[in-house]
Amino acid sequence: MKNGNTTADYTADAVVVGAGHAGIEAGLALARLGADVTVLSITLDNIGYLACNPSIGGSAKGHLVREIDALGGEMGLAADACCVQMRMLNRSKGPAVHSLRAQVDKYAYHNYMKAALENTPSLTLRQGEVKRILVRGGKACGIETVLGQTIKAKCVVLACGVYLKSDIIIGNVIEHKGPVCFCRANSLSRSLERDCGIVLRRFKTGTPARINGDTVDFSALEVQSGEDTPYSFALTSKKVNKKGRVCYLGYTNERTHEIIRENLHLSPKYGGLIHGTGARYCPSIEDKIVRFSDRERHQFFLEPEGEGTKEMYVQGISTSLPVSVQLPMYRSIRGFEKVEIMRDAYAIEYDCIDPSELYPTLLHKRIEGLFFAGQINGTSGYEEAAAQGLVAGINAAHYIAGKSGIVFSRKESYIGVMCDDLVTKGTDEPYRMLSARSEHRLVLRQDNADLRLSETGIRAGLLTGNRKAAYMRLKKQINAARELLYTEFVPESCLPDGGNGKMKLSDAVRRGLAWEKAAEFLREKKLCDLAIFEAVTSVRYEGYIEREKRAVREAARLENMPLSPDTDYFSVGGLRTEACERLNAIKPLSVGQAARISGVTSADVSVLIVRFSKSERNKSGCADEE
């Protein structure tokens, strides 16, 4: 039941600070798992706001959205409901890197997520800025707002996005504001340093200009249409709301580059005004011109911001150059000769933490009951933030209930890869999910996200009702499709090259029978395309997948060898001083995690295996062999 009085001090089970993509998933997960939760946003107008590109998903990020849905999160449902164009990326490559991307109406997305929070039982949504975290005896026990209101709670989830002491920078102008000129959080950074002893650092990101679509000559650009295939992120989305909006592809030119080079001294980055670390994988146009000086052009995409607005997003040309340079720079591009800027491009700097201070559950190692999720952990991207919010929300609910936390492993999900990377290696720049970060990506495909994670979602209590039923139906259909692949025969006229006589469908698939041809046979059995694709893929790549699974099992052996977070590694004989220092700083929960820590060598790992496998044997009453 929601709190009856939210105008004075009160008590809740949990407080989530921030209502961006991380805060939304954390708040919804907590409430759906039975907690009485308050979600605080610095303004209710920024809930689920797509402050950068108006899209959800993309390479590797689409995997995260599918995993969020498989666990019972909200982002996939919202993206499907607000979609204006859908495309499957990397279709010319193998299924491991296929990734769904949706252009969405950013205003509809905000309204969808705001309504989702407002209509969730046991969730109270409030506008307010947090002044400090209440910490007693090393435990977070609530928050105090700048207006003097106190909300006591059993745990706090910080999902502050890029709002902590954020500065918008354009040329030599610095404005103390958050994204899109929303208010920034002025006080919380001080509390994190003073009350929590957390060292903060500055990261940077940026966006391109928003331009008036009526002033663009679209005939000079290449049309990028969506696909007719009925894709969706969410398993329960019956029909994706595709309105057929198109995007456009264009290119910069030598004149564009010349304008930028002539004005590099006015760039706040190259002029020394920007001190925060930016994302290597999402460089500004200035960075591109400097780093890739041999390139004659750089591509960009022109994307609609939403229905009912003429604003368009120039994906690929973010900048923090002065406004006096931005307009001639954009107008130098073919098709943009008469373009009008509606919102100037900008860079934004903000405070964040070192995520190696967290456990894989995203709980802080020194402050009990304090969880962190999203860009405050040094990540970049809506999808990365939402996935962390879901992890933090689930584990905060478990913390309140006195249950053990859930650690998502690298071998089962991209979410696990991301969380492990963050807490084990940390990050020196805004972290972006990439398929190359996963050593097991062949078995971590987006098409099998439900098979990998829905059982976890059911056990956690998030995947219920229609969503659970949909997963059970899909699982049944996949099993049926697999059985048919090994029992049905292909007509000789449809056999792949080199085939003759009677051939089972599974053998034909291994010999190169196209997925579409195999699907024709299986659709007659009233099986859905997702089940067919998963079954066909598992057969086609079964040799590679089995080899990958063996590697996963070997990795699991080390992951299942636990380490105590209370261990003082200086007391463990045989370890080098550097290894002891790094192990004491990270406090790994397993030998596998320890092996991924920078500064820990294979020799150090061998010491841990011998030392702690002996401890486990002694605990179980087994004597060591002579």
Image: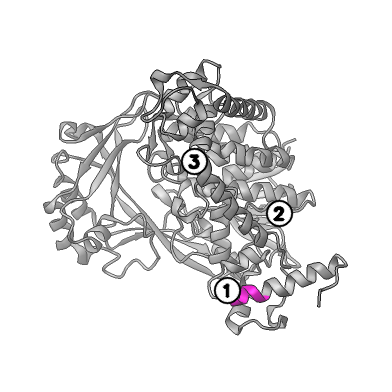
Horizontal relation, residue 115 to residue 430: left or right: right
What whole-number distance in Å separates the C-alpha atoms at marks 1 and 2?
38 Å
Q: Earlier in the sequence, mark 2 or mark 3?
A: 2
Q: Residue at x 56, y 31 (%)?
A: 115
Main secondary structure found in the magenta portion: helix
Please name the residue that numbered disc 1 is placed on. Answer: 602
Please name the residue that numbered disc 3 is placed on. Answer: 541
Secondary structure of residue under mark 2: strand
Contact? badges 3 and 1 (CB < 8 Å): no
Q: Which residues are magenta?
A: 601-607
Q: Earlier in the sequence, mark 3 or mark 1?
A: 3
Q: Which three-letter amino acid code belongs to the residue tagged 2?
A: Cys
Q: How many marks?
A: 3
Q: Callout 2: few (<14), some (14-19), or many (20+) C-alpha neighbours within 10 Å? A: many
Q: Callout 3: few (<14), some (14-19), or many (20+) C-alpha neighbours within 10 Å? A: some
Q: Position of residue 385 (x, y in %)?
A: 52, 49
Q: Residue at x 68, y 42 (%)?
A: 456
Q: Nearer the viewer, mark 2 or mark 3?
A: 3
Q: Position of residue 405 (x, y in %)?
A: 72, 53
What whole-number distance in Å separates the C-alpha atoms at marks 2 and 3?
45 Å
Which of the image's four quarters has the N terminus? Answer: top right
Q: Which three-letter amino acid code belongs to the residue tagged 1?
A: Ser
Whether residue 205 is situated above or below residue 313 in the rendered picture: below
Q: Position of residue 235 (x, y in %)?
A: 56, 29
* Viewer-side residue, 509 vs 90: 509
Q: Callout 1: few (<14), some (14-19), or many (20+) C-alpha neighbours within 10 Å? A: few
User: Mark on residue 155?
Assistant: 2
